[in-house]
Amino acid sequence: METTAAETAPARLRNTPSWLISHVATHTSRLVWGAFDAAGARRYHYALLSALEEFGPASQAALGRRCGIDRSYVVAAVNELVEAGSVERAPDLADRRRNVITLTPAGAERLRHFDEVLAGVQDELLAPLSSDERTQLADLLRRVLDHHSGR
């Protein structure tokens, strides 16, 4: 069995939160990518469908800003979601230069499936933690993120 950097790295690295976060993030990305790939989706699909469900119809530009996704990726992901019947794209009646994206019932159903996929990833990733520890970890990470994003 191959050893990993997490097993062989010097203790001063293994005890540094930034190093730990970086390595856990890399592992997490692999898990999420693999799970969404198996479900016929990408992380962007999940983010966009989530934003549409929570905040309602929006322009592609607004979706990109809300989800932190580059405009060109939003266009490609929305095209894929339209093709799958998960969203509808229609001209904005107030400004014909932009499109409004709306979640369809099939998209809401697909989002529920993706929620289950992501829950499975969370369970695999956080297996060594109790429910309370998972909540505490999420709270701590959210505080750090909020601090650095100006919230």
Image (cartoon, rainbow, N blue to C red):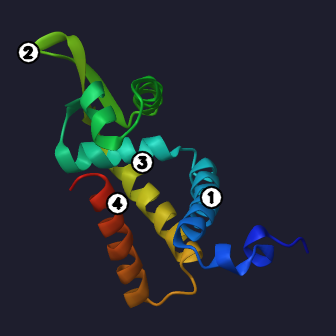
| Residue at the (23%, 15%) spot, across then down | 98
Q: Residues within 10 Å of mark 1 (few under 14, many from 20)?
A: few
Which quadrant of the structure image shows residue 2? bottom right
Q: Residues within 10 Å of mark 3 (few under 14, many from 20)?
A: many
| Residue at the (53%, 43%) spot, across then down | 42
Marks 3/1: CA–CA distance: 19 Å
Residue at the left extreme of this rendering: 94
Q: Residue 76: which numbered mark, if any?
A: none
Residue at the top extreme of this rendering: 97
Q: Position of residue 136 (x, y in %)?
A: 36, 82
88 and 101: which is toward the camera? 101
Q: Give the amino acid type for the residue marked by disc 1 in the picture.
A: Thr
Of the two numbered discs 2 and 1 on the same chain, state the one appearing first in sequence.
1
Q: Which residue is mark 4?
A: 145
Mark 2 or 1: in front is 1
Q: Give the amino acid type for the residue marked by disc 3 in the picture.
A: Tyr
Q: Residue 94: which numbered mark, if any?
A: 2
Q: Which residue is mark 3?
A: 46
| Residue at the (60%, 66%) spot, across then down | 19
Q: Which residue is mark 1?
A: 26
Asked if the residues shown at circle 2 and circle 1 are in contact, with their CB atoms under 8 angstroms apart, the answer is: no
Of the two numbered discs 3 and 1 on the same chain, state the one appearing first in sequence.
1
Q: Residues within 10 Å of mark 4 (few under 14, many from 20)?
A: few
Mark 3 or 1: in front is 1
Kindly tell me whether residue 106 is visible in this rendering. Answer: no
Marks 2/4: CA–CA distance: 35 Å
Q: Position of residue 33 (x, y in %)?
A: 60, 51
Mark 4 or 3: in front is 4
Q: Secondary structure at mark 1?
A: helix
Kindly tell me whether residue 131 is visible in this rendering. Answer: yes
